[in-house]
Amino acid sequence: MDPVLNEANQKIDAALNHFKMEIAGIRAGRANPALVENIPVEAYGGRMKLVEVGTISAPQPTLLTVQIWDASILSSVIKAIQESNLGINPASEGTLVRLPIPALTQERREEFIKLLHQKMEVTRVEIRQIRGDMRGDWQKQKEEGTISEDEFFRREKLLQELVEKKTAEIEELAEKKEQELAEI
């Protein structure tokens, strides 16, 4: 990769990784720890992710369990899960919280697909913003005479190719997730 694109590539990869993390939390009828690991829990005077207060596992295809490390925050964990709008009704047994994953209704699938498309668009906008920022920096360099016009257009072309490649990757990830959501 061209060294001038390293900064853009790192920023775009960060946006892409964030998108991957976001869509991992969109459930597809199967129990997946990523579904709940980022739920914010009020604990120890602050907000922590569920994954930071317990061990999440999927012992069955339709069940997640969360082994809470500190019994004093159990009620906060249950409250956070109930308020997460995932349609999960937690049940606790000591410090173990069982999360039965209900089957998806067609209406819920459509909501998740709509949410997926929103997250995809936000990521695309983020990538376009990165492209615009990089282009603006290079434009200034061109005006100051630090880079030639040919170099500016070369960089611009390489950046556009990178953006197109990463956008295609986002669309592919979204398409896979949409197929996963469509499965019954």
Image (cartoon, rainbow, N blue to C red):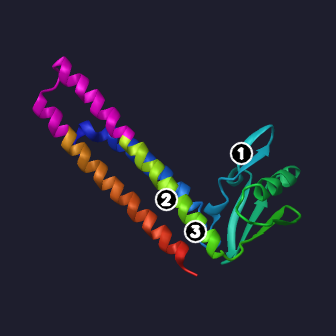
From mark 3 to mark 1, how far is it between C-alphas? Answer: 30 Å
Q: Amino acid at mark 1?
A: Met
Earlier-in-chain disc, 3 versus 2: 3
Quarter occupied by residue 27: bottom right
Earlier-in-chain disc, 1 versus 2: 1
Q: Which mark is residue 100?
A: none
Relative to 184, is 144 above or below? Answer: above
- Residue found at x 81% / y 40%: 44
- Residue found at x 73% / y 42%: 47
Whether tag 1 and tag 2 are in contact, CB under 8 A, the answer is no
Pointer 3 residue? 110
From mark 3 to mark 2, how far is it between C-alphas? Answer: 11 Å
Q: Is residue 25 left or right of residue 118?
A: right
Whether tag 3 and tag 1 are in contact, CB under 8 A, the answer is no
Predominant secondary structure in magenta? helix
Q: Amino acid at mark 3?
A: Glu
Q: Is residue 29 left or right of residue 15?
A: right
Where disc 1 sits, the SS reads: strand
Q: What is the x, y in percent for residue 73?
A: 84, 50
From mark 1 to mark 2, how far is it between C-alphas? Answer: 27 Å
Q: Residues within 10 Å of mark 3 (few under 14, many from 20)?
A: some
Pointer 1 residue? 48
Q: What is the x, y in percent for residue 142?
A: 18, 24
Where disc 2 sits, the SS reads: helix
For the record, the magenta segment spans: 129-155
